[in-house]
Image: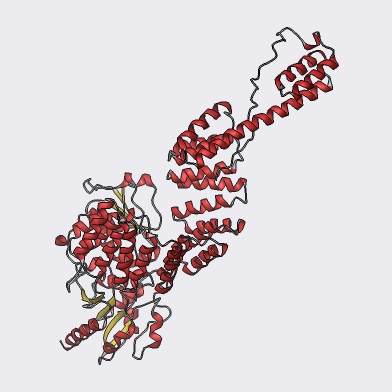
């Protein structure tokens, strides 16, 4: 928003020609009487000869300094001159704004700089210059001009808001937020400044504060559809999907029936697993704009997540028919090929995307998954470094440039800071690399959620665990946890599956040993991870354990907590549950680890339970979907990560029964032996 201001300008002296009949030494009263001179001054004003009238009044005041008519005449002329000067400024400023609106930015800049020579103290003009330089993407110069504006007018809320926008675009999020705060301090009902501050806070990852800013914006302006939309987007990112949809719906009620909002509702429904409602909203978006490639890509994502690969392919191809140069559409087709197990075709599609955009992070990252599945861990981990270049769903922040290890410099006595990344299973799987940094001579600090500290401390290392980021000047190098295999040059041929690297608490092992009495063959089971999108296709119903539960002298013990636990209420076979207090303390997995130590076998879906069991060295069978997560590779019974883990794979997509038939046969053979 650009609002010009005419506060505090210097009065421009008129350059109109003075009367030639008057010399510097003459006074008008030398030739005219006082009343005649006053009448002449009034006539000059009527004719628009303001400067001549001023000269007459000044001559009168030299002789009669208290003459009321002359004093009032001068005052009247000053007002007229001020109005004329303001009108001149406004006319020129409006012309500049018109050029700005027409995107004739170079011409607007030239005109603005000309006007600045005449009005060097005009705050509004610096505000306009800031906007022009921002549009030219010269953000540093724009910021300098906004600073001039607020120096001239410290209560200039609009300039503070605009400066915040320039700072945000310049990557200075903290300074941008300060500028927005100053704008709202000056003008408490400045809804746009709250909206912009919400965007900056969201970009910084401070979702709770961003949500509060958007809420302030819509409280001030209940018809602010964009603010409702961005509030919904932020609620979505925080996982409050129902509230997000409510916010989007409010934007629609206001009358903003645009494509973006329907797409956003569809994306949130997709996250919730409501595929039908997602596609309904995408279709509404297409009714508004039938040529929106983004909507076709989103609809393809919904079909893909629902396993409707043919429909997904058609949607992505429709997006390409609208825009053949859309790298995203080629990438999405590659994702379909990958999900179908057609790895070479997937790589071909990713390469087509990369021909259009050689640094497209999603295509590079997706290529990494193919290389992992094919067993090329070296290439996979190299490309996996593109994960934090993604503009959406970035799993972690990129290490600061001055703290990146080049994989060559000696780490002896260097302080290496590692920060948490991924879910619980990822932390358990990749914390094994922390001691490897120590073996290279580094002093290692690992920032990780406090609930995992006690478990990770059972690892044989001197790693310092914290929840806080150390001061930058105390760090030599830093990296996210899942970059360690790349930094340590991990290759599949060099990997030796870990026998175990975590341990359970001895006292807890004994406690659960007493509770889990009996001589039955104890199998710890887990059938589901979280309710996130990534866990849906790799989870299966607990009812599939029925035949195993009916094997004589076998006891099933539930290691599962959270979403999916309610399934136990509807089964017709026995599963031992471990009570309300099972792993309910501040620390995660301590009870689970101890119970695992008392189990003869663990059978689990692809979730954190699988990684914990493997890290403890417990005999474990992990059940994988047809095309598994990248870490398990495309084939093989043995696990590359854990020596005690064996992998059971779907032969047919979505068919878990065949997998359980195979498990049943192997289990019966194990029990006989």
Where's the C terminus, which quadrant? bottom left
Q: Residue at x 34, y 78 (%)?
A: 559
Q: Nearer the viewer, residue 386 or 471?
A: 386
Q: From where the camera sits, is residue 501 visible?
A: no
Residue 479 on image: x %, y %: 31, 53
User: In the figure, residue 516 lies in which quadrant?
Assistant: bottom left
Residue at 46% of width from left, 64% of height from top? 262
How many marks can you see? 0
Above or below, 235 against 61 in this view is below
Q: Position of residue 141 (x, y in %)?
A: 46, 35
Q: Position of residue 628 (x, y in %)?
A: 25, 70
Q: Looking at the picture, does residue 222 appear above or below residue 591?
A: above
Give the left or right position of residue 469, taking residue 361 as reference. Answer: right
Q: Is 73 placed above or below 473 here?
A: above
Q: In which quarter of the view is residue 672 placed?
A: bottom left
Determine the residue located farthest toward the front in the rendered image. Answer: 47
Front position in the image: 176 or 281 = 281
- Relative to residue 231, is residue 506 drawn left or right? left
Residue 146 horizontal side relative to residue 9, left or right: left
């Amino acid at each position: 928003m650009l609002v010009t201001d005419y506060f505090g300008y210097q009065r421009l002296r008129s350059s109109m020609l003075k009367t030639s009949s008057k010399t510097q030494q003459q006074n008008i009263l030398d030739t005219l009487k006082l009343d005649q001179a006053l009448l002449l001054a009034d006539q000059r004003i009527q004719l628009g000869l303001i400067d001549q009238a001023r000269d007459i009044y000044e001559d009168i005041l030299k002789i009669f300094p208290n003459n009321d008519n002359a004093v009032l005449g001068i005052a009247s002329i000053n007002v007229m001159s001020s109005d004329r000067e303001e009108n001149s400024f406004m006319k020129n400023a409006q012309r500049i704004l018109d050029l700005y609106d027409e995107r004739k930015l170079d011409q607007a800049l030239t005109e603005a700089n000309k006007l600045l020579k005449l009005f060097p103290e005009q705050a509004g003009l610096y505000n306009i210059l800031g906007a022009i330089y921002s549009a030219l993407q010269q953000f540093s110069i724009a910021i300098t001009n906004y600073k001039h504006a607020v120096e001239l007018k410290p209560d200039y809320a609009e300039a503070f808001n605009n400066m915040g926008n320039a700072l945000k675009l310049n990557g200075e999020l903290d300074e941008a937020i300060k500028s927005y705060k100053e704008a709202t301090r000056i003008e408490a009902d400045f809804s746009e400044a709250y909206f912009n501050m919400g965007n900056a806070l969201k970009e910084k990852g401070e979702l709770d504060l961003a949500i509060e800013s958007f809420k302030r914006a819509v409280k001030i302006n209940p018809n602010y559809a964009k603010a409702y939309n961005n509030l919904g987007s932020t609620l979505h990112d925080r996982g409050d999907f129902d509230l997000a949809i409510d916010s989007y719906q409010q934007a629609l009620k206001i009358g903003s029936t645009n494509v973006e909002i329907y797409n956003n509702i569809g994306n949130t429904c997709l996250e919730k697993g409501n595929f039908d409602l997602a596609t309904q909203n995408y279709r509404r978006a297409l009714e508004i704009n039938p040529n929106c490639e983004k909507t076709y890509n989103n609809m393809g994502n919904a079909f893909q997540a629902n396993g409707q690969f043919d429909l997904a392919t058609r949607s992505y191809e429709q997006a390409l028919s609208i825009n053949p140069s859309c790298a995203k559409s080629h990438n999405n087709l590659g994702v379909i090929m990958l999900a179908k197990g057609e790895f070479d075709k997937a790589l071909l599609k990713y390469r087509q995307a990369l021909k259009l955009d050689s640094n497209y992070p999603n295509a590079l990252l997706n290529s990494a998954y193919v290389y992992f599945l094919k067993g090329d861990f070296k290439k996979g981990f190299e490309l996996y470094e593109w994960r934090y270049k993604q503009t959406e769903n970035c799993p972690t922040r990129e290490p600061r440039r001055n703290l990146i290890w080049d994989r060559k410099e000696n780490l002896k006595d260097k302080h290496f800071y590692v920060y948490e990344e991924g879910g619980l299973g990822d932390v358990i799987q990749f914390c094994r690399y922390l001691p490897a940094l120590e073996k290279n001579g580094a002093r290692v600090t690992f920032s990780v959620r406090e609930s995992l500290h006690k478990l990770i401390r059972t690892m044989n290392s001197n790693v310092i665990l914290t929840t806080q980021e150390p001061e930058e000047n105390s760090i030599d190098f830093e990296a996210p946890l899942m970059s360690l295999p790349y930094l340590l040059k991990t290759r599949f041929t060099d990997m030796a599956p870990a026998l175990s690297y975590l341990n359970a608490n001895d006292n807890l092992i004994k406690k659960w040993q007493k509770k889990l009495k009996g001589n039955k063959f104890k199998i710890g089971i887990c059938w589901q991870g979280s309710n996130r999108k990534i866990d849906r296709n790799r989870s299966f119903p607990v009812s599939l354990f029925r035949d195993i539960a009916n094997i004589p002298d076998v006891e099933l013990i539930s290691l599962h907590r959270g979403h999916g636990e309610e399934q136990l209420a509807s089964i017709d076979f026995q599963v031992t549950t471990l009570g309300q207090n099972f792993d309910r303390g501040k620390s995660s997995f301590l009870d689970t680890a101890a119970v695992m130590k008392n189990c003869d076998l663990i059978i689990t879906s692809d979730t954190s339970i699988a990684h914990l069991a493997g890290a403890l060295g417990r005999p474990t069978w992990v059940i994988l979907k047809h095309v598994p997560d990248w870490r398990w590779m495309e084939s093989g019974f043995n696990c590359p990560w854990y020596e005690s883990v064996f992998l059971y794979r779907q032969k047919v997509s979505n068919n878990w029964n065949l997998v359980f038939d195979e498990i049943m046969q192997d289990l019966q053979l194990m029990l006989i032996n």
